[in-house]
Image (cartoon, rainbow, N blue to C red):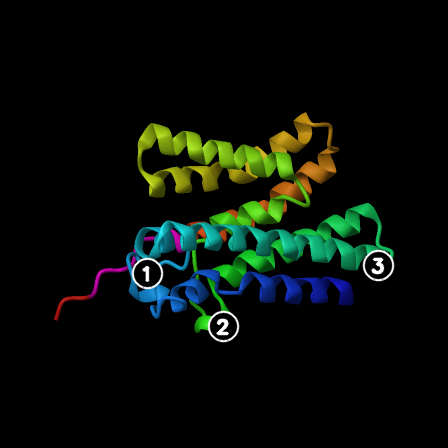
């Protein structure tokens, strides 16, 4: 249990690193005050330059991957079995995405978490992550609407990850664990994809 709590804490603190805000400050700006105000790679690239946007993208993917990789290492260090290691790592991944979405470092604000969600997948279920990436790129080409492509991908993501796991020979229990863990990832990002409320009149 202590390992689980430690992994969640590490995952959150890694995920909460405000990559886009740090990049914006290099140019004397605040990421929440430029463009859409989203703390993500796309907003950074559009308003602060492609190079900074690419750096933020890499950093956001890396912190998701680091969270799950660190949790796996911690679980292995204390001698947990394969199923327990997976559970601990998945919990750390969820914490990382929550950290990105509501970062303690920047007043509980954050980004939408798509890059971090992809990063979480790399040490655990890389084929599922790549399938999700392929889906969002395909939908983006078809719809030409980034918001719509993101929302549709998030709705399908838990099912897609579980299906890919089953098709690649994972046992049903593992596929169910992946579905259960990726569902909150999708929910967190869907919450962050909601349009801002219009100010009340009067």
The residue sitting at 50% across, 60% down in the picture is: 100
Give the labeled residue for mark 3: 77
- Counting from the top left corner in percent of width and height, residue 152 is at 41, 37
Helix, strand or loop at disc 3? helix
**Farthest right residue?**
79
Q: Is residue 116 above or below residue 21?
A: above
Give the labeled residue for mark 1: 37
- Counting from the top left corner in percent of width and height, residue 72 is at 75, 53
Helix, strand or loop at disc 2? helix
Q: Is residue 86 left or right of residue 114?
A: right
- Which quarter of the picture shows residue 121? top right
Mark toward the start of the polypeptide (3 vs 2): 3
Marks 1/3: CA–CA distance: 40 Å
Q: Is residue 140 left or right of residue 198?
A: right
Marks 2/1: CA–CA distance: 16 Å
- Counting from the top left corner in percent of width and height, residue 186 is at 50, 47
Residues shaded magenta: 192-199
- For the residue pair 12 and 166, the one nearer the viewer reads as 12
Q: Is residue 113 visible?
A: no
């Amino acid at each position: 249990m202590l390992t689980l709590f430690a992994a969640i804490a590490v995952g959150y603190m890694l995920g909460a690193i405000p990559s886009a805000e740090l990049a914006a400050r290099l140019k004397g700006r605040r990421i929440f005050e430029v463009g859409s105000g989203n703390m993500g790679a796309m907003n950074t690239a559009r308003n602060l330059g492609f190079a900074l946007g690419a750096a933020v993208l890499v950093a956001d993917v890396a912190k998701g991957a680091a969270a799950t990789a660190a949790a796996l290492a911690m679980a292995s260090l204390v001698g947990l079995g394969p199923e327990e290691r997976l559970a601990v790592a998945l919990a750390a991944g969820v914490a990382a995405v929550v950290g990105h979405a509501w970062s303690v470092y920047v007043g509980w604000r954050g980004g939408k978490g798509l890059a971090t969600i992809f990063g979480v997948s790399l040490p655990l279920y890389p084929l599922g992550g790549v399938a999700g990436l392929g889906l969002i790129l395909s939908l983006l080409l078809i719809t030409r609407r980034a918001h719509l492509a993101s929302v549709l991908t998030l709705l399908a993501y838990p099912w897609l990850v579980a299906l890919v796991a089953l098709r690649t020979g994972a046992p049903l229990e593992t596929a169910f664990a992946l579905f259960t863990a990726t569902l909150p990832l999708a929910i967190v990002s869907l919450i962050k994809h909601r349009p801002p409320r219009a100010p009340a009149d009067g």
